Amino acid sequence: MNARRRTFAISKIANTLEFRMLGLAVVLAIALAFVSPHFFTERNLFNILDQSVVLGIVAVGMTLVILTGGIDLSVGSIAGLSGIVLALLLKEFPIPVAIFLAIGGGALIGLVSGVLIAVFGLASFVVTLGVMAIGRSLAYIVSGQRSISGLPMGLQDIVYTTFLGVPANVVFLILLYVVTWAWLTYTKGGRTIYAIGSNIEAARGAGLNTLFYSIFPYVAAGALAATATTFSLAQIMSADPIGGNLLELDAIAAVVIGGASLYGGRGSIFGTLMGVLIMVMIRNGLNLLGVSPFWQGTAIGSIIILALLAERLITWRSRRV
Amino acid sequence: MPDSSRPREPLLEARDIDRVFGGAYALRQARLSLYRNEICGLLGANGAGKSTLSRIICGHLAPTSGQIVFKGEPLAIGSAKEALRSGIALVAQETSLAPDMSVLENIFLPSYAMPGRLSFARLRRKAQSILSELGPNHSLPLDMEVRRLSAAQRQLVEISKALALNADLVIFDEPTASLSPTEVDSLFNVMTRLRNAGKALAFVSHRLEEVFAITDRVTILREGRTVADDLPTAGLTQTDIIRHMVGRDIGNVYHKAPPDGNAGERPVALEVSGLSAPPAVRDVSFFVRKGEILGLGGLVGAGRSKSVEAVFGLRHRAAGKITVGGREISPRTPIAAIRAGIGMVAEDRRAQNIVPDMSVGENLFLAQMGKHRGFGRGEAAKRAQAGELMERLGLPADRMDANLLHFSGGMQQKVIIARWLLTEPEVLILDEPTKGVDIGTRQAIYQLLREVAGRGIAVVIVSSDFEELLGLCERVVVMSDGYTIADLPAARLNEESLTLLAAPRSSAERNTAFLRAIVDRYGGCAFWGLIEEDQLVCLSVVEGDPGAPVGLAAGQIYFLHETSIATALQERSSSVVRERDGRATILMHLSNRRGHDLGWIGVTARQGGTLPDAQALSSAMADLLETPANEEMGS
């Protein structure tokens, strides 16, 4: 009985989309290891994790938004604008204060979107499209259309400090995913996020705080976009007004590859992590193979569509049996 | 009525239909024959396969095996377009309308699939003639978007859509689910007309009284099989049908508890007074005691659901006082109401109660999580209680992780009710608790609600099913057009009196105006009511000047012998009847053109006053009956 239940549980996990995406990630890694001798080196694997940090952080916020049935197109612009703002703040304030203010600014932009969407009932696509345009435009104006460099050297510490050999930004990414997973799974707030995306009427009727948790994901997405920028600035030590361009699309793709439904209510943070790794690995592999950057878009786009098509065909078949 | 000499040549015959969904048989060797000039009831419990069979006949679904013969020729299977072209139309259960398109476009949507050019002018003329065919009172704004129509109007569009196809066979799949008794009556008129025009009709319904009212024959499905084929309705009783549907006798569905002697002394759990939430809710007051089952009755649109939503904090209140257990509350969100001890099972199970992406277990704990004040999910403390509850409801514990949508409507409803029981409410409000639930499960839900009340929880039931209200509730508060107009023990009501009490105010106003006209002319007191055996259900009273106090009040029920005009009420004579104290009363019976009993109109003169001439009164009443408002009210 117990053993049967265990095999049942295993087959259930194996049937989840996240698990299949993990499989895809592994297959992809093995394939890349075969075609490029440089892929499976320690240095490149750390590279991949390192490159996953910015997209990974932004994708967490995007997951929350998509779980409630919304979409946030503004995260790329928020990343760009808060990068510029952070660079300017760093000239005036100590590093922790500047970071705190920049992240707060990102959260504030998200709050404005969230209130417009949840309180006034505007479509998230339209509101965040507007914020996207505004954010990018302000990034150019505030920066004077120039990239800003000469950041304090101490900023690099948040990337180059290591814990047990693991860089701080990767540690942060892992912690963020673990905490978000636990929050989404075990707390009232996390379950409310799912319930809103699945059936907001039922959630409200059952006494869940649907208003607060409809706004919160946008605040989190804004704050996390600014956080991602902070790590990116620490790596390249300069802020560019075009920074974070199209980041929102990569984040949406990662979340969707990870199995979330754009209608809300379905998806998982583990799936998003798989989506992020798949996206970064493909890009990394294409670079290793020396594929022209102009072809990379075609390759990544095709792989995303093929992955989702395969997934849909598998679901169809399992449903028919 | 069907002609007894009609040829027994079916218009449509479906034979040996199998349909498999995900490994399970939804239909197994099902068969159905439909004849011209007949309405055939297609019956069965939930999940028996009625809708599946209807959809197969209309080509919306392909059967796994089986054949359909229509007009003597095999019908191409699984093609909706082919079925439409041969003359088969479906009035769907969940309206299949395009909400953002106009009424006109929706009526002719199937013609978009036909080759050729569309002429909107011609379609418009055709739509008007179809609507006038449906009856003089049905006017639909052809250019209005369907989204803005009422449920009943949408149903009318569905029917027009079927008529526009000039189909020979029309299947009505639970068309009455969202209609009030008035609207059901006019739907039945339309169906009768179609039958008499030589069409074959199939009528799918859960409501047995409707089946008896409209069908000529019935075919009954159970678990996908046809268990009774083509039985003449006239020879059947409700018990026969139920036995076929569930495969056993289920006895009395309601099991009314014996009246509790000290019921009137139990403390009041919820009291609502002067509640207003415009435009639907204008002045609503009611109370419910601990352990009592109170019914909120009325027609669809009377404001019952909106009233309970306002009490539950789902709707903004303009005025009104709500007390729970003696404490006044003013909930602006459901959570405030839940923490004050109210639970509510909303009307639409799928849209308002179930969270489809969550498991049975999570759906069960949802309200508990809402009530819980901590950071976590707040399930641990209730786990044992939940297990016990699920066992009582007959849900295996190892299916807590399954998807709730995979269960029958009845089981879903039980889980939703259990969701609220876990929060240990003082008051449980249920809006249409048995909508779309088959009769076998209904009994289990009634049983559960009785147990809930037995534990001292006050239960409020909103229901459009008057039989259910009267069978289940101890007391019924009747609403009409946003007002509470009567509060009566269920034992003193029956479906007729409830229907009349619930009639829309507009028609009651018309009758009241008539009473007013009489007393203005003659003085005294005029009233409109229903006489049932030894009781008078008083619907409307007008006192003239000078008056003749009779002691009647609208919305009340009196024993005839208790009233001051007992002799007149007992004799029911259209000539003048005098009481011992000298009061004179004249009573006239009121019925509409379809012979439906509308009750009695009475005029009582003060001592020594004059009464209207019986002749004059009856001709004035005849005028009254010709008005459309009464046509509406009478059903």
Image (cartoon, coloured by chain):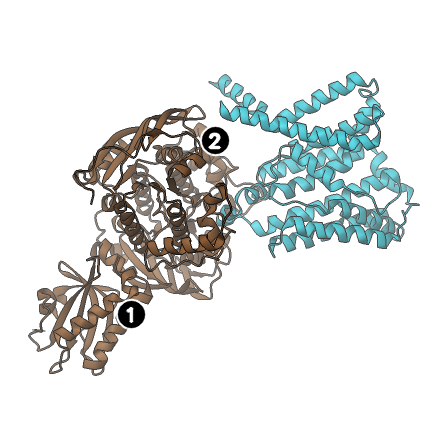
- Which disc, if any, is residue B402? 2
Q: Is residue B154 above or below residue B228?
A: below
Q: Residues under labels 1 and 2: Cα distance?
A: 55 Å
Amino acid carrying mark 1 in the image:
Arg
A69 relative to B264 in the view: left or right: right
B143 relative to B614 in the view: left or right: right
The mark total stands at 2
First in sequence: mark 1 vs mark 2: 2
Specify the chain shown as brown. Answer: B
A245 relative to B614 in the view: left or right: right
Choose between B122 and B343: the one closer to the eye.
B122
Give the residue drawn at x 11%, y 66%. Answer: B572
Percent x, y for residue A243? 82, 43
Percent x, y for residue B531? 16, 62
Give the residue drawn at x 43%, y 32%. Answer: B61
Percent x, y for residue B507? 30, 66
Amino acid carrying mark 2 in the image:
Ala
Choose between A53 and A143: the one closer to the eye.
A143
- Same subunit, tags 1 and 2: yes
Say what secondary structure mark 1 lies in: helix
Percent x, y for residue B164? 40, 47
Q: Is residue B514 above or below residue B260?
A: below
Choose between A168 and A312: the one closer to the eye.
A312
Residue of label 1: B510
Q: Find out whether the residues at labels 1 and 2 contact each other: C-beta distance under 8 Å.
A: no
Find the residue positioned furthest to the right. Answer: A150
A112 relative to A241 in the view: left or right: left
Specify the chain shown as cyan. Answer: A
Say what secondary structure mark 2 lies in: loop
Of all chains, the one bearing label 2 is B
User: Can you tell which of label 1 and label 2 is closer to the viewer?
Assistant: 1
Of all chains, the one bearing label 1 is B
